[in-house]
Amino acid sequence: MYKITDVKELRERTGAGMMDCKKALEACDGDIDKSIDWLREKGIAKAAKKESRIAAEGICQIKVAGNTAVLVEVNSETDFVAKNEEFTKFVDYLVDKVLENDVNTVEEALKISDGNETVNDKLIALVAKIGEKISFRRFEKVTKNDDEVFGTYKHMGGKIGSIIVLKGANEEVARDVAMQTAAMNPVALNRSLVPQDMIDRESKVIKEQVMAEGKPAEIAEKMVVGRLNKFYKEICLEEQSFIKDSSLSIKDYVKNNGGEIVKMVRFAVGEGIEKKEENFAEEVMSQIKNS
């Protein structure tokens, strides 16, 4: 048999509801450790039911330690949960674990041991407690040399995160470039890194536009080159106009401060995830009918 204090302890250790804790203790003859495992198993069942749901909100978090920096993205179903203290604490915990361990994939990160649990166990427990699908979507670990500096920036409360590595410049310049990266959404650091399919698609659109204008062939060709150059200036970080001084490109700004850009990383929460359009009134009425 179990005591009321056992229920209290189990709730504090798992975050599960009172009735679930009572059921667990009854099923496990009052053994708290076994009850924790029992709740975890139920949490797995709850989490599995949520896997088909769309989690496109969330936050990015960045952590730097010495010559290593990590950027992670963790998703939730609603922005409300993304601002929940337990959710944000888990994201902070996650970025620390990725930074501390030699992992290269999300799958490897989820298998990191922490005492008797793994990171994935903690994620499952959080899903069970909060009641939404939570997804550790991606991370990138960036390293630098001793003669290089990091610049990091989080935009819109963590909706966008960026890491920049500069060689030969200071951290203030690096932060400026990270801010530019977060705000202006460059596709690539420079022209050589722009995906070829993107270049081909843009070139095709530009050529069709110019042909529709009925220009002579030699003029049309120059117009295509000119518009493609304008396209590069919009999507390549080095060619973008510096947001603090539009007379300078980012490449010139960094060069004027004795540096060059080595690497750029940028995450935007939910990018590429097709969000489901919900009718809020209908959702509320559905919940009322099913309650």
Image (cartoon, grey):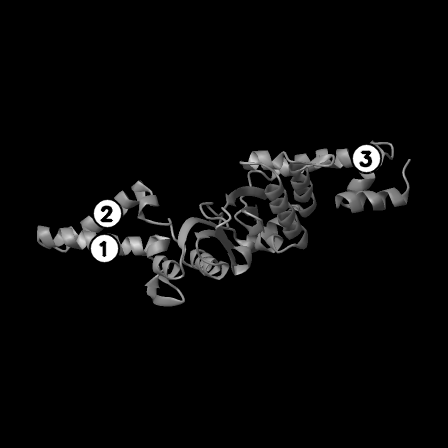
Q: In this rendering, is residue 258 above or below 287?
A: below
Between residues 228 and 3, which one lies in front from this camera angle?
A: 228
Asked if the residues shown at circle 1 and circle 2 are in contact, with their CB atoms under 8 angstroms apart, the answer is no
Report the amino acid beneath label 2: Ser
Give the mark, 1 or 2, whose residue is nearer the N terminus: 2
The residue under label 3 is: 33
Task: Bin the neighbour count of mark 2 within 10 Å (Cα to Cα): few under 14, some 14-19, many 20 and up.
Answer: some
Question: What element does badge 1 sit on?
Answer: helix
Q: Quadrant of residue 241?
A: bottom left
Q: Earlier in the sequence, mark 3 or mark 2?
A: 3
Measuring from the top left, give residue 105's x and y in whole percent: 54, 36
The reply to whether dot 1 and dot 3 touch (C-beta < 8 Å) is no
Label annotation for residue 93: none
Secondary structure state at the residue bearing disc 3: helix
Q: In this figure, which residue is indicated by the disc labeled 1?
A: 227
Q: Secondary structure at mark 2?
A: helix
Residue 227 percent location from the top left of the image = 23, 55
- Where does residue 1 sit, x and y in percent of width and height? 91, 35
Say which quarter of the image contains residue 137: top right
Q: Is residue 69 visible?
A: no
Amino acid type of disc 1? Answer: Arg
Q: CA distance from mark 1 to mark 3?
A: 66 Å
Q: Which of these two is toward me, 250 or 54?
A: 250
Q: Is residue 142 above or below residue 149?
A: above
The type of residue carrying mark 3 is Asp
As measured in the structure, the alpha-carbon distance from the residue carrying label 1 to the one carrying label 2 is 9 Å
Q: Residues within 10 Å of mark 1 (few under 14, many from 20)?
A: some
Q: On residue 203, which mark appears?
A: 2
Residue at image coords 14%, 56% = 213
